[in-house]
Amino acid sequence: MSYLSAFIWDTSPEIFSFGIITIRWYGLLFALTFIVGYQILTYIFKKENKQIKHLDSLAIYVAIGTAIGARLGHCLFYAPEYYLSNPIEILKIWEGGLASHGGAIGILIAIWLFQRKYKEFTMLWILDRLVIVVALGGLFIRTGNFFNSEIYGTPTDLPWAVVFALRDNIPRHPAQLYEAIAYFLVFIILFLIYKKNTFKEGFLFGLFLVLVFSARFLLEFLKEVQSGFEANLLLDMGQILSIPFILVGIFFVFKKNKLKKSHNKTN
């Protein structure tokens, strides 16, 4: 395997530090997920004559649900013994460790709580639109993982191999970028279907689950395991957790219900 033919990635995950304050690329990209997502949802809410104040409330619910779900997902799915023995470590979210499957569960719970308060929305109405920006968020998050030199791929001699110099000197699949590209394509597909103005309720949500978690399942074969116990499993934890999401997605994609206009006809 040729080390010289690989792209050397040795960029610091920190943008700058000032005293005890450190700004990291991952944190900036994580924040962009919500900033850009809010702008897209603002367009959708205005397009469908929904009140922006409700979007503000939804954004708070989703932000909290994402952060709590992603953190607990990492702690309980990938290192339960350590974190249950050291529960205070769960709070140290700034040290890294977020799981997309946990984030997905956190978002679902957040939307359920939001819908209980704002009954003019249905869960599927929210989910069909929220998944558009969640897919785009996957692009930002995985790019952040690339800057952190984490969740990288297995060794390879392909011409686009990357050496994560902050970790080791082995040319590897840039698995984070593979996922980032996959999620961006999912975003494009979902947004174009939304723009066509007709889709059955729950279809975008189901298609999102099928596309995102199928991509995640397949790309896991090119990634290093994140926890030692996964080395002895036929499928790693990311793949095991993806299967139920894919099955739920298939159900909503093929669920028979009346085709509905996604937008108000006056728009």
Image (tube, grey):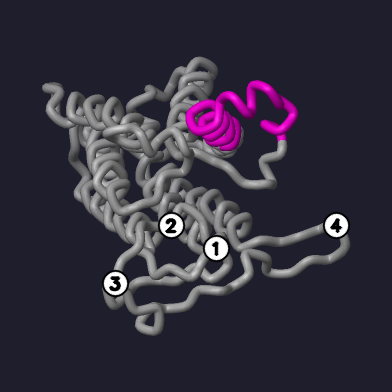
Give the numbered dot on residue 20: 4
Residue 172 appears at what percent x and percent y?
A: 38, 65
**Which residues make up the magenta segment?**
67-91
From the image, tell me which residue sits under label 1.
167
Crowding around mark 4 (Cα neighbors within 10 Å: few <14, some 14 to 19, many 20+) is few
Residue at left offset 45%, top offset 71%: 163
Residue lying furthest bottom? 4
Spatial distance from mark 4 to mark 2, Cα to Cα? Answer: 28 Å
Kind of residue sitting beneath label 2: Tyr
Q: Earlier in the sequence, mark 2 or mark 3?
A: 2
From the image, tell me which residue sits under label 3.
157
Residue 252 appears at what percent x and percent y?
A: 21, 27
Q: Secondary structure at mark 1?
A: loop
Spatial distance from mark 3 to mark 4, Cα to Cα? Answer: 40 Å
Quarter of the rendering occupied by the N terminus? bottom left
Spatial distance from mark 1 to mark 3, Cα to Cα? Answer: 18 Å
State the residue in front, 257 or 174.
174
Residue 211 sits in which quadrant?
top left
Kind of residue sitting beneath label 4: Ile
Instruction: Specify whether residue 118 is in view.
Output: yes
Q: Earlier in the sequence, mark 3 or mark 4?
A: 4
Q: Secondary structure at mark 2?
A: loop
From the image, tell me which residue sits under label 2.
152
State left or right for residue 223 relative to residue 108.
left
Instruction: Specify whether residue 57 is in view.
Output: no
Pointers 1 and 2 in contact (CB under 8 A)? yes
